[in-house]
């Protein structure tokens, strides 16, 4: 049994994972409503909230049957907000010491990268390894507020980054677009909600694709294009056309993500395509990636909506499934706020 903690940003999360049976339980306290009042995450407030809620969540985990079988504690060591990471690591070290078990530091991004395999494990833990092997090599798209990445996993689960963003991440572009449109925090979900009633072809926002050989993403030009479009419109016209603006802006982000993913699939004989990260909860993006997967004749593995944002289940699962994760002496494990994926 693996006990995992996640405190990298504004979600306090705890999970229990049994490799032989799957998730035994997960508990999360979200801070979205608190930070919405400030228009974004306030690091000091986030750290304070982790301090307030981590203990109660752990008490709920302790009441779960099988907690006494915990043989490892896993904690997100980065990337993330320094204060939040440090508080989580302190708690994880105390738990590992009290339980007399090893401590594993998990790369938050690698947790996202492996999260699409959680449903595969849940469908049959006993033969998970064999079914996973049949889906390798694997291409993954990790898309969130801070990162937009294409990566591959080979037959030994060695991860290689294929592309990143040259400027804004996709989620960041959606949030900045929402701010330009006068929407609240978090912006991405509000853009998606309004876009449902709009036309995605109403405005011709740029896709930032570049040459087919270049897989890197770029979204800063899209944000600038939206700003110029809004400057040409009156407040009344913006209010009237807000759904069309959201639909067209969102579609430009999704087109860039789906087309670049398609370019990457053309390069190697992949067997599966993964979708993870906070923006992976966008229903239109999931639909577009399903089309891309069908066209390439690969299996789409999308993280479950509850595991697209920051969560401890993916941390626990990565601590078991990711060969790059190992146990560390309590005194040697450190936080790494700027930790990269590879």
Image: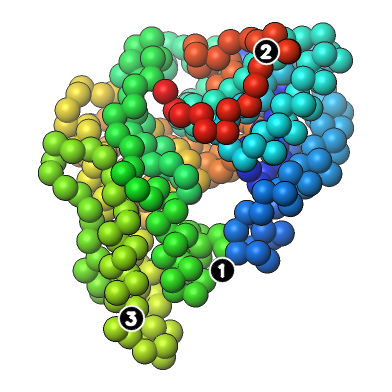
Judged left or right of residue 219, residue 69 is right
Distance from Cα at disc 1 to Cα at disc 2: 41 Å
Residue 231: which numbered mark, if any? 3
Q: Is residue 124 left or right of residue 207?
A: right
Give the camera-side residue of 196 and 82: 82
Point out the frontmost of discs 3 and 1. Answer: 3
User: Looking at the rendering, in which quadrant would you find the C terminus?
Assistant: top left
Callout 2: SS: loop
Under circle 3, the secondary element is helix
- Around disc 3, counting alpha carbons within 10 Å, would you say few (fewer than 14), some (14 to 19), or many (20 or more)? few
Residue 256 percent across, percent down from the top left: 26, 50
For disc 2, the neighbor class at 10 Å (few under 14, some 14 to 19, many from 20) is few
| Looking at the image, residue 307 lies above or below residue 201 | above
Q: Earlier in the sequence, mark 1 or mark 2?
A: 1
Pick the residue in front: 18 or 340: 340
Circle 2 residue: 332
Q: Decide which of 135, 312 is in the foreground and name it.
A: 312
Labels in figure, total: 3
Quarter occupied by the N terminus: top right
Which numbered disc flags the more N-terminal residue, 2 or 3? 3
Instruction: Say left or right for 24 vs 336.
Output: right
Residue at the spot 62% in from the left edge and 40% down from the top edge: 81
Q: Position of residue 300 (x, y in %)?
A: 35, 34
Q: Residue 141's spot in the image, x, y percent?
A: 36, 36
Asked if the residue at tag 2 contacts the one at tag 1, i.e. Cβ–Cβ closer than 8 Å, the answer is no
Q: Is residue 25 visible?
A: no
Q: How is the image coloured?
A: rainbow
> Residue drawn 21% across and 69% down?
204
Please tell me whether mark 1 sits on a helix, a strand or a loop.
Answer: loop
Q: Is residue 178 visible?
A: yes
Tell me the number on the disc at residue 295: none
Q: Provide the residue designation for mark 1.
A: 184
């Amino acid at each position: 049994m693996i006990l995992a903690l996640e405190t990298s940003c504004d979600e306090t999360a705890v999970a229990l994972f049994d490799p032989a049976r799957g998730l035994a339980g997960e508990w999360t306290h979200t801070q979205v409503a608190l930070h919405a009042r400030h228009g974004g995450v306030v690091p000091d407030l986030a750290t304070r909230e982790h301090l307030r809620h981590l203990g109660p969540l752990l008490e709920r985990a302790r009441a779960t049957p099988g907690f006494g079988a915990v043989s490892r504690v896993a904690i997100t060591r980065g990337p993330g907000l320094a204060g939040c990471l440090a508080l989580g690591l302190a708690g994880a070290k105390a738990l590992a010491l009290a339980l007399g078990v090893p401590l594993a530091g998990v790369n938050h991004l690698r947790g996202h990268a492996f999260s699409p395999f959680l449903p595969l494990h849940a469908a049959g833990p006993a033969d998970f390894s064999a079914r996973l092997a049949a889906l390798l090599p694997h291409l993954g798209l990790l898309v969130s507020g801070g990162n937009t990445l294409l990566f591959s996993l080979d037959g030994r689960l060695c991860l290689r980054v294929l592309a990143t963003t040259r400027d804004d991440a996709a989620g960041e572009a959606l949030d900045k677009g929402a701010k330009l449109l006068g929407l609240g925090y978090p912006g991405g979900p509000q853009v998606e909600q309004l876009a449902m009633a709009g036309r995605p072809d109403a405005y011709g926002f740029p896709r930032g694709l570049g040459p087919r050989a270049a897989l890197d993403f770029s979204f800063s030009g899209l944000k600038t294009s939206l700003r110029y479009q809004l400057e040409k419109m009156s407040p009344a016209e913006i209010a009237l056309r807000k759904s069309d603006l959201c639909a067209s802006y969102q579609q430009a982000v999704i087109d860039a993500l789906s087309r670049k993913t398609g370019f990457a699939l053309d390069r190697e004989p992949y067997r599966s395509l993964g979708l993870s990260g906070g923006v992976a909860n966008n229903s239109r993006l999931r639909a577009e990636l399903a089309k891309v997967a069908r066209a390439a004749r690969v299996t789409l593995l999308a993280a479950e909506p509850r595991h697209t944002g920051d969560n401890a289940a993916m941390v626990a699962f990565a601590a078991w499934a990711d060969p790059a994760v190992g146990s560390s002496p309590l005194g040697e494990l450190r936080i790494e706020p700027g930790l990269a994926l590879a």
